[in-house]
Amino acid sequence: MRHRDPTSKSARSPWRRRVDLTRHRAGRLDPVVQGLLWSTAAGLCFVLLNTMTRYLTAQIPPLQSQFLRYLCGVIVLLPLVLRGGLAAWMPRNVKGQFVRGFVHTAGLAIWFTALPHISLADTTAMGFTTPIFIMLGAWIFLREPMRWERWLAALLGFGGVLIVVGPGLTASGGFYSLVMLASAPMFAASFLISKALTRYESAGVIVLWQSITVTLLSLPLAVLNWQPVTALQWAGYLLCGLLGSGAHYLLMRSYTVADISATQSVKFLDLVWAALLGWLVFADVPTIHSLIGGVIIASATLWIARRESRRP
């Protein structure tokens, strides 16, 4: 009598077979298209994360909020670390992980300081300057080819952002608007270091050590103005840790399959996610500027994906 292998096709559940089929089909996509899909999913997670973070940072001092968000990022990853063993999560280049952590911590300290004083729309809009710095850095430091299609897609996407936020963008943020803008090149440098690390580190290792290094480097800043944290706020930070770790993992996956400059145009879809979230959660009806800008952003993203998929 033959014993059925539990791992055989017939023994797998219908849900498992659908997952495997989806994974197989996704693996056959062009690498740039895969990178764009990973980046799109990461952007959705980042929009959810920023919404929750802004809510919490209005209650907790910014630098303490930064520390708690990344501490919870480590906590949510601990089950995976314990399951796989510490050796599997040790990086090959510890120094590179701490360099990346230092740069990212500096950018976060600037970003969290300005966050409570600027609206979410303005924050999202100013964050769209980061892809421009990333493409410049990828061209200068990583020697990635800067094809005209990538530049055009990024400029079209940025133009769509200006159409959406332009009518409502004011100077009320004043000094803090400049502070928020200053974080963009820091984040760009952090993501470029991440791209370099993906050459010999897995996405999971990079995400874990980002949380570890930012937590350690943020602790001295957090204790300077510490205040008690309620159970509900802890729950919120744990959700932020889950969203943040997931978003950064998806982003690292995109970097492992495609040039970092090729995936930057999809960053502008974050504004579309933000508009949809505002409509679903807060009943904010999108304006005509949001609709026009969203069409331009989506068109630029689909166009660059089509162009890149046809390139040998």
Image: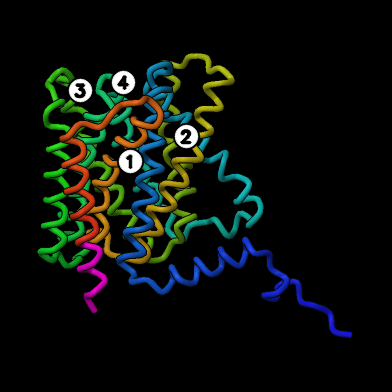
- Residue 262: name its quadrant: bottom left
Lower position in the chain sequence, tag 2 or tag 3: 3
Query: Which label belongs to residue 116?
Result: 4
Q: Is residue 202 left or right of residue 169?
A: right
Give me the residue at 39% from left, 18% from top. 61
- Label 2, secondary structure: give it: helix
Instruction: Please report the bounds of the magenta region as a residue range.
Output: 304-312
Residue drawn where x is 10% and y is 64% of the image: 148
- The residue carrying mark 3 is 176
* Label 4 vs 3, first from the N-terminus: 4
Q: Is residue 110 above or below residue 291?
A: above
Q: Please state, as top left, top right, bottom left or bottom right, where the C terminus lies in the image.
A: bottom left
Q: Which residue is mark 2?
A: 240
Sequence order check: which comes first, mark 3 or mark 1? 3
- The location of residue 202, given as percent across then percent down, is 46, 61
Between residue 286 and residue 175, name the one nearer to us: 286
Majority secondary structure in the magenta region:
helix
Q: Residue at x 25, y 23 (%)?
A: 118
Crowd class of label 3 (few under 14; some 14 to 19; many from 20; radius 10 Å): some
Residue 267 coordinates in the image, percent (x, y): 26, 48
Left/right placement of residue 278 relative to residue 4 reads left
**Depth-wise, is mark 2 or mark 3 nearer the camera?**
2
Give me the C-alpha separation between circle 3 and circle 1. 24 Å
Secondary structure under the numbered disc 4 in the rendered image: helix
Q: Which residue is mark 1?
A: 273
Looking at the rendered image, the quarter that the N terminus falls into is: bottom right
Specify the amino acid type for callout 2.
Cys
Position of residue 153 measured from the top left corner of the image (x, y, whole percent)? 15, 56
Task: Residue lying at the far right in this picture: please name it.
Answer: 1
